[in-house]
Image (spheres, rainbow, N blue to C red):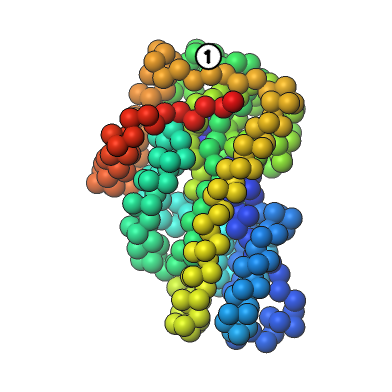
Amino acid sequence: MRKPVLSLIIILFVISFSYLDSAAQEKARVVIKLATLAPRTSAESMEEFRTLVKQQTNNEVSFKVYYGGIQGDEDDMLRKIRFKQLQGAALTGHGLGMVVPEVRVTELPYLFWNYEEVEYVRSKLEGTMNELFEKKGFIVLGWGEAGFVYSFSKVPITSIEIARKQKWWLWDDDPVAKALYDSLGISPVSLSLTDVLTSLSTKMIDTAGITPYGAVVLRWHKRFKYMNEYPVMNVIGAIIITTDAWNKISPENRKIIKNIIDDHFKGISKSQRKTNAQSMKVLKEGGISIVRADLESKEAQFVLEASEKTREALVGKLYSRELLDRTISLLNEYRAKHPESGIMRIE
């Protein structure tokens, strides 16, 4: 429960590029300044991307990346883009939603059960989302994901009554998570990502949503004992740059960059899924117990009903009725074609 966790981003973006040496940047005709919350240590694979862009554009274009949130959080990044201090950023759904609210429609809680459903629906909506970003003055260089978020707790949450007794973390009043908590009758505690670990220690909160990898790298898993198997939501992410910056690049080199990114992004999501799977082993070895999901149970039905109320509450606020109906229709379409589709089980 929650929203993209700044950490997920950290994870997910992975989609960070690397600093070019100053001499190379001076020679480049176009320098694109990007910011990301991802640490530089997570961007090893981006060295290849940076090198390919430099080589294939004959050093016309270079990317200068500010890692680890040194340009601030996603709100700060977008503000600096407006003031032309940056030309782009790697963002999660939280930041992307501040530009195009409609993008949050595929981050609705308890919507997807597995990665195949995510891929099917998002691939069908990608063209629409790209157009919406272009209308706001941005080009989406590539889409990615951080994986599924799960609810971590200090006690096994097996009923809505138990859930309501917990102190849930809400990331900076995120509208999607807030709507879900309202539907569940839960009053969360709004905190920034950086305050979560301390707040777990001081018992200000005792329950939070995050990906398995995020739980490990942020060391939150040491404060929890249980993880619910039912995935809360799948975190979306993307790298965007301003149309003005994109238009400074020659048409030929724009095509080259898009081709490099398309090839590069093919493996990003799969790599992230593998990382989450590996992190799950760390969690279990560290003593985290899995609370199994049962879609036939009364509690699961209650959650599904709350999920539907959440979607309805956000119509006209984040997205249109038409876009929500289209999203649900695509999901139902996939499930009709794949009756075996179900909750991704944690082994």
Q: Quadrant of residue 175?
A: top left
Numbered marks: total: 1
The residue beneath circle 1 is 158
Q: What percent of the width, then of the height, locates residue 225?
A: 68, 21
Q: In the image, is residue 302 above or below residue 343?
A: above
Q: What percent of the width, then of the height, locates residue 136?
A: 39, 65
Q: Quadrant of residue 278?
A: top right
Q: What percent of the width, then of the height, locates residue 337?
A: 29, 37
What residue lies at 52% left-to-right and 27% top-to-bottom?
345
What residue lies at 45% left-to-right and 51% top-to-bottom?
97
Q: Nearer the viewer, residue 218 or 70?
A: 218
What residue lies at 74% left-to-right and 26% top-to-bottom?
286
Q: Is residue 127 left or right of residue 207?
A: left
Name the image quarter holding the C terminus.
Answer: top right
Q: What percent of the width, then of the height, locates residue 29?
A: 60, 86
Please state which amino acid type lies under the numbered disc 1: Thr
What residue lies at 70% left-to-right and 54% top-to-bottom?
42
Q: Nearer the viewer, residue 186 or 59?
A: 59
The answer, for residue 216, to whether it is visible in the render is yes
